[in-house]
Image (cartoon, helix red, strand yellow):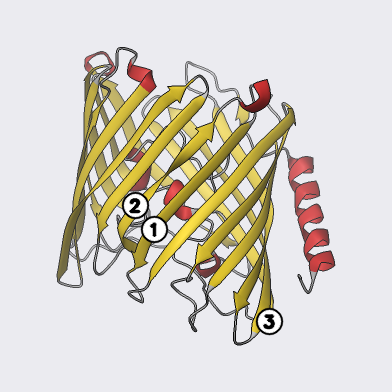
């Protein structure tokens, strides 16, 4: 039983009201002239409640609220500016404790700030040559966005929430910093992407980069083997990072395939990092329904993962069920349930933990 549901509900309602007044969740597009693409603004608000079970102490409870705004604004066909502002508040009787290496990507407790924090804007050059077959980015950017473009296990704001189902937790992608990405797309069935960036970059720092002569590098080969290239994809990824004179390298695989009309299966594997990633030995997979019950804008997902937390060496098993209900174009509500067996980052060994979440998003397109 949750100890403080009313204050959390009020905070959540207030956050949703704020977002609805500003117009967020889906992109707010501001039309630019002269052939420049339109800008986008995303605003989010949510709350997440967790009820933990420890046999020796009984249930414990924790409630968090989360707010985020992010956007991008092309100033020319070659230059794009991005920004992020986010904040969160933790209430409960164990607020200082991180619980899991997997818990919700949007509501990850050990990354929440008690006060909103302004992130340094991303600023990078981008372009396409040879009819779009060669693509590149150069500047301050997040390398994670250029790899593992899984069809259904990717976007934490519209699909799954938990970390193993939104990115590969076995890959220690650096924060947003100086870097470069180049991609070759010779046709619809194959592509090759490579990237390099500052291994010590920290997204929330106000300096441009933290160059120490240590780099993260990665390369990914994507193959689309079926007659319909959009029906299935397999991505094989390898990376190497050097930080504090310690070198790690490993591999990862991500795949998705349509197994029935509007039903997509996915899998994500990672051998992991023994030093810098959140997890190693990651195995994750599940199913997503892109048009459940005939509703074209809804989404449902069910997924399971296991891995070993690098910080503690403990193995945890993780499951998530999520449904996005979008009754009207400008509003979406996503109830979410997460279950963790043996939470890996808990200070004491817990048999299991349940997390119940609710993600809401308002949108206004103009």
Q: Nearer the viewer, residue 124 or 89?
A: 89
Say which residue appears at 26% left-offset and 35% top-offset.
235
In the picture, which quadrant includes the C terminus?
Answer: top right
Could you give the CA–CA distance between mark 1 and mark 2, rounded to whole angstroms? 5 Å
Q: Is residue 332 above or below residue 231?
A: below
Residue at image coords 40%, 24%: 77
Q: What residue did someone put label 2 on?
A: 283
Q: Is residue 323 above or below residue 108?
A: above
Q: Nearer the viewer, residue 170 or 7?
A: 170
Instruction: Assess disc 1: are there few (<14), some (14-19) or many (≥20) residues with their C-alpha within 10 Å of its C-alpha.
Output: many
Q: Position of residue 260 (x, y in %)?
A: 47, 22
Q: Is residue 140 visible?
A: no
* Residue picked out by circle 3: 93
Tell me whether circle 1 and circle 3 mark residues in contact (CB < 8 Å): no
Nearest to the observer: residue 243 or residue 34: 243
Q: Secondary structure at mark 3?
A: loop
């Amino acid at each position: 039983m949750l100890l403080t549901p009313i204050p959390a509900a009020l905070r959540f309602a207030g956050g949703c009201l704020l977002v609805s007044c500003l117009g967020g969740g889906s992109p707010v597009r501001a039309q630019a002239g002269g052939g420049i693409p339109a800008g986008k603004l995303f605003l989010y608000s949510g709350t997440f409640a967790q009820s933990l079970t420890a046999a020796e102490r009984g249930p414990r409870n924790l409630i968090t609220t989360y707010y985020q705004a992010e956007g991008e604004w092309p100033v020319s066909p070659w230059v794009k500016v991005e920004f992020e502002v986010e904040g969160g508040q933790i209430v409960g009787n164990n607020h200082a404790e991180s619980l899991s290496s997997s818990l919700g990507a949007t509501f990850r407790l050990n990354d929440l700030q008690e006060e909103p924090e302004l992130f340094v804007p991303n600023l990078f050059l981008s372009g396409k040559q040879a009819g779009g077959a060669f693509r590149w980015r150069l500047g301050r950017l997040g390398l994670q966005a250029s790899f593992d473009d899984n069809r259904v296990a990717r976007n934490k704001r519209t699909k799954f929430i938990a970390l193993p189902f939104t990115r590969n937790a076995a890959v220690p992608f650096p924060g947003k910093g100086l870097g470069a990405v180049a991609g070759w797309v010779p046709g619809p069935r194959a592509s090759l992407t490579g990237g390099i960036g500052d291994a010590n970059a920290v997204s929330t720092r106000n300096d441009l980069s933290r160059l120490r002569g240590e780099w993260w590098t990665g390369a990914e080969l994507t193959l689309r083997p079926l007659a319909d290239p959009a029906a299935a994809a397999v991505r094989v990824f390898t990376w190497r990072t050097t930080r504090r004179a310690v070198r790690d390298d490993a591999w990862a695989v991500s795949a998705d395939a349509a197994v029935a009309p509007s039903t997509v299966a996915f899998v994500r594997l990672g051998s992991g990092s023994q030093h810098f990633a959140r997890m190693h030995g990651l195995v994750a997979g599940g199913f997503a329904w892109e048009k459940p019950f005939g509703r074209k804008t809804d989404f449902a997902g069910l997924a399971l993962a296991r891995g070993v937390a690098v910080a503690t060496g403990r193995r945890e098993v993780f499951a998530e069920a999520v449904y996005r209900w979008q009754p009207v174009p400008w509003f979406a509500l996503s109830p979410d349930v997460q279950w963790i067996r043996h939470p890996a980052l808990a200070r004491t060994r817990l048999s299991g933990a349940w997390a119940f979440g609710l993600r809401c998003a308002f949108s206004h397109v103009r």
